[in-house]
Amino acid sequence: MKRPATSSAAWVIAALALGLTLGVLGHGAAWGERAQAIMAPIGQLWVNALRMTVIPLIVPLLVVAIAGSGDLKQTGALSLRMLLLFMGLLAAFTLASFAVSPALMSAVRLDPAATSALMAQAAQPPPAAPVTPSEWLVSLVPANAFKAAADGALLPLLVFTVAFALATTNAPPATRSKVVEAFRAVAEVMIILVRWVVALAPIGVLALSFALGVSLGAAGAGAVGYFLAVSIGLYLLGTLLLYPLAVFGGRVGWRRFAVAMLPVQAVGLSSRSSLASLPALIKAGRDDLRLRPEVADLVLPVAVSTFKLQHAIATILGVAFVARLYGLELTPLAIAASAGAGILIGATTPGVPSAGLMLQAPLYSAFGLPLEGLALLIAIDSIPDMFKTLFNVTADMVVAVLLSPQGTAEAGDVTVN
C-alpha cells in the first residue's frame, strides 16, 4: 500500500527539480519566455482543478467531524480534558509560530521586480481592501452562505458550516444520522476526485516550478531550499519541546518515553501517515508506557484522526513564505486569521497526501495569495511531511500520557534520567 504514495512523491519531487532547473536555465533568455507562455496555462489548469474540489470537500468533512462525534459525548470528563489539551497545545504552538515564522521568512531576499512579474502571471484576484477589526468580525457571519461558498470566502463559510453541524447534533437521532450519512457519502466521493487531481500533480508542478525558475532565477530555487530547511528545523524543534511535557506533566522517565516513541516515530517518518502509526502508538502506550486502557483506546484513535498539531506551524509558515515569494505584505490580523482557519481545516483532513495543504486553497484566495504558491508548497510537501508526521504522532502520545499520569509511572522509575 505504500508504494503508490512513495512513487507519486518521487515523481512530484522529480518534476519540481526538473521544472526549477529548466526555469533557472531559461531565466532572462528568449526561449524561456516562449516556453513559459506554453507552460503557464498547464499550471493554471491544475490550480483550477485544486480549487474546484476544496469547498465541496471541506464542508462535508467538517459536518461529519462535528455532527458525527456522538460517541465522544458519552465519554464525559475524559473527552473534555482531551479536547482542552488539544486546544491548549494548538494555541501554544500557534502563538510560537506567529512569533517566529514571519520573521524567519523575512530573511528570503528576492528582487521586487521579479516578484511583481511572478505575481502578474498568477491567475489570482487582487487582495481585498484592508478592513477594520470590527468590519472583519461582522464579515465572519455570512448573509448568504451559498454566495460565500461561490466566492470562496472560507472563514464565513466555516462559521456557517460549524453552526449547521452543531444544529445537526441537536436534531433527533434519526435526522442526525441521515444528515451525517449524506455528507459522509459526498465526502467519500470528493476524496476520490481529489486523488485524481493529486495524480496529475507532477504535470502541474513541472509547469509551475518552471514559471518560478524563469521569473526568479536561482534566487527562487534558493528560497525553496531555505523554506524546506526552516520547516524541517521547526518541526524537529517542536517535537523536542513536547518531551518535557511528557516527562514533567505525565511523570514518565526521559529514556522510557524516548524508547517507547522510537518505533512509532519510525512508522510515522516512513509512512507520512498518523493513521498508519496508530497500531504502533497503541502498542507503545499500552505495553511500554502502561497507559490506562480507556485512555489508549479513546485518546489515541481520536488524536490521530483529528489532532494535527503541525498545522499550528505549517499554516503560518506557508502563508508567510508564499506572501514573501510573491512580494505581498500581510497584516498580523490576516496571519492570525489564517492560523485559526488552518487549524480548523486540519481537524478534517482526509487521508490523502498533502490534503491538508489542498484544503487551504480558499484560505489563500481569501487573503489574495496566489494558489500557484500553494501548489508549490504541495510539490515540496513530501519532504517536510515526514517531519510533520513525526511531530503529530509525538504530540498524540504526549496528550495520552498527560491524561494518564498515574498509569505511566512504575515503582522505581526515575522521572528525569
Image (cartoon, rainbow, N blue to C red):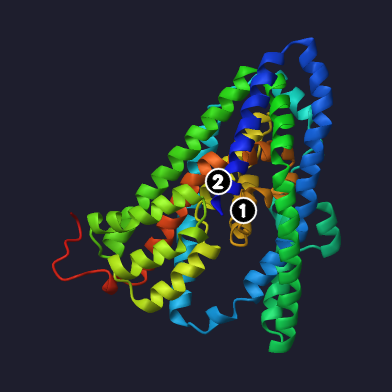
Would residue 116 be seen by someone viewing this image from the given angle?
yes
Q: CA distance from mark 2 to mark 1?
A: 9 Å
Q: Residue 381: where, in percent of width, then height? A: 58, 41
Whether residue 135 is visible to the viewer of this picture, yes or no, is no
Q: Secondary structure at mark 1?
A: helix
Location of mark 2 (residue): 314
Residue 175 rendering spot, x and y as whole percentages: 74, 85
Left or right for 100, reference 11? left
**Residue at image point 81% right, 44% down:** 48
Residue type beneath disc 1: Gly
Q: Which residue does the image show at 74% across and 48% down from the upper left?
A: 197
Please, is residue 339 above or below residue 224 in the view?
below
Residue 256 in the image: state x and y as whole percent.
24, 58
Q: Residue at x 39, y 62 (%)?
A: 397
In the picture shown, does residue 137 fall above or below 287?
Answer: above
Of 318 and 199, nearer the camera is: 199
Residue at figure coordinates x 81%, y 34% from the top left:
42
Where is residue 30? Give x, y as percent.
80, 11
Identity of the amino acid at label 2?
A: Ala
For marks 2 and 1 on the same chain, the one whose residue lies earlier in the sequence: 2
Residue at the disc numbered 1: 342
User: Is 103 situated left or right of 258 in this image?
Assistant: right
**Element marked by disc 2:** helix
The reply to whether the C-beta atoms of the residues labelled 2 and 1 are less than 8 Å apart is yes
